Image (cartoon, rainbow, N blue to C red):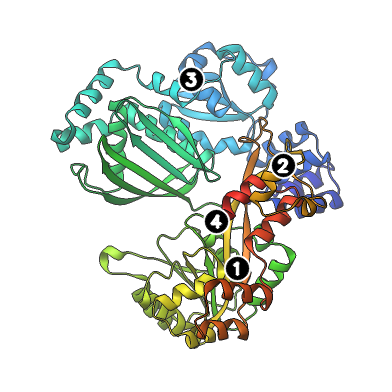
Amino acid sequence: MAEKRLLGQMLLQEGIITENELQEALDIQKTSGHFLGRILVDLGHVEESDLKRVLSLQAGVDMIDLKNINIDRRAIEAFPSALAKTYNVVPIKLEKDLLTLAVGDTLSLNIQDDISFVLGYKTKMVLAEESEIKEAIETYYGKEIETIDDLIKWLAQDVEEMEGLDSIASQGEYATITSLEEIASLPPVIKLFDLILLQTVRDNASDLHFEPFEDDFRVRYRVDGILYDLVHPPKGLAFALFCRFKIMAGMDIAERRLPQDGRLELSVMGRAVDLRINTVPTVFGECLAVRVLDRAKTIFELESLGLSKQNFDKIDTLIEKPNGIILATGPTGCGKTTTLYAVLRKLNTPDVKVITTEDPVEYMLEGAVQVPIREKIGLTFGRCLRSILRQDPDIILVGEVRDLETAQMAIQSSLTGHIVLSTLHTNDAPSTIMRLIDMQIEPFLLASTIEGVVAQRLIRVLCPRCKEEYKPTKAELLEVRLTEEDASTMKFFRPKGCPFCRGGYKGRIGLFEILIPLEPFWDAIVAKRPLGEIRKIAIEECKMRTLLEDGLEKINAGITSMEEVAKEIHGY
């Protein structure tokens, strides 16, 4: 297969941009993580039409002028309006079982297989202008905004099947396994299951929640740390969705009185997605939660995590150490694993051996040996780490220090000349050491092995298109412990909201607190000084910048709002 040409090189060859313009966009991409083509358009170096033409060449698809195409009415009738509006796709031709669809960007090509599965047609994609697609959707489907709820109405067209779902759902725990397996395989259930996952991956959601109530059933998903309503399916369809999740995850579909855990690997939009599924019984039926781990996600560079120069220099110093333990700490979902993988990416050179052990493996890192934990068969972190040491690694990543055995093995690995990266759940960097002492680890062993602790949180980033500068009130300033005098030299921005973001925010970035323990710190630990005093020593003697200080710097730079920082440092 021919190697895919790089967009930047193709734009250069076409004479559309210069070397300097390409380098400028690449530098921005390193820190923002945005798509190169979009950056070049925003900078004014490339016209939207030229970008679309080159993207079509890169992807090997036809570029069409939608205004001069006669759209097949049969294609419109075969393609539901809610699907067209949800994914910004226009059907233009239906020939036998081949449906031709016009999309606005090459990223949408990834949903081709998913749409084929939902509709039962083979599909062919062509590229068209976004504005022309929007106009065609309004012409053929109307201007009303439709949601995934409207798709349910389309899925529920087969009344007989829907009545069968309701009938089996009403049987509750008395339903037979055969009937449960049957409803999980019905076309409306398969289609809704696929559409929910499609929307979840498309919007980069981290979690799915299926929640039963007395008169309602709610499906929500979490995007950038915030929960949003996704769909409210009817009772029968919701019950069948549960059955499908449980069957595919290898769970017991007949057991609805006890909590269960399962795991499922799927390909959605051409991306490998790992789903961790948990159910708990409630008064109105089972509640199901799904953690979505997109293994195809880009592993971020250290430069794009949101580290200040001072914190970046500290991490740079830490990773130059020949051995020792580096810990990332914070609540669940704060980006600890992402940070450690960014460090691994920097350390992962051809002359070192990297082994990771995780539950589960969240990112794929080329050149690293990655071992998933399987506690059901006795493969725990401690046991796995013991075996890893016999593999002669240079760098080891342990997913989490959960118990004394794992902590002891990590320390032993460090003392025998290895770099060990791991995570822990604590509120800040200094209390991480106290947590390890609570695990019965001797302070002198910690002093010999702990090179640094990185505490972090994730905060939402203000949308650059619509954020607005303003003057905060005294009460707002107190939320981030600022006086009016302190605020006089700072700038403050707040979210406004626009079509390109969710409520004025787009994406997330890290707040960091990095502790490199020095002798005065360890003296205080050995002397069993109070945590407040130890924290003061970390700030004054070890030059640790707190999460709040890092947050204030990001507020002043217009990266985030006071509300976001206050939410993460409240009570801290």
296 sits to left or right of 544: left
Q: Decide which of tag 2 and tag 3 comes sooner along the chain.
A: 3
User: Which kind of residue does numbered mark 1 sit on?
Assistant: Val
User: Which kind of residue does numbered mark 4 sit on?
Assistant: Gly
Query: Which quadrant of the figure has residue 463?
Result: top right
> Dots 4 and 2: beta carbons under 8 Å?
no
Q: Decide which of tag 4 and tag 2 comes sooner along the chain.
A: 2
Label 3 neighbourhood size at 10 Å, few (<14), some (14-19), many (20+)?
Answer: some
User: Which kind of residue does numbered mark 2 sit on?
Assistant: Thr
**Residue 230 rendering spot, x and y as whole percentages:** 46, 32
Residue highlighted by disc 1: 343
> Dots 4 and 3: beta carbons under 8 Å?
no
Could you say which is closer to the camera, residue 166 or residue 89? 166
Q: Nearer the viewer, mark 3 or mark 1?
A: 1
Residue at image position (77%, 51%) is 487
Tell me how far mark 4 sits from mark 3, CA to CA. Answer: 52 Å
Residue highlighted by disc 4: 571
Residue highlighted by disc 3: 79
Q: Nearer the viewer, mark 2 or mark 3?
A: 2
Mark sitting on residue 473: 2
**Residue 217 rendering spot, x and y as whole percentages:** 35, 30
Describe the element under mark 2 as helix, strand or loop: loop
Q: How many marks?
A: 4
Quadrant occupied by the C terminus: bottom right
Label 2 neighbourhood size at 10 Å, few (<14), some (14-19), many (20+)?
Answer: few
User: Which kind of residue does numbered mark 3 sit on?
Assistant: Phe
Label 4 neighbourhood size at 10 Å, few (<14), some (14-19), many (20+)?
Answer: few
231 sits to left or right of 480: left
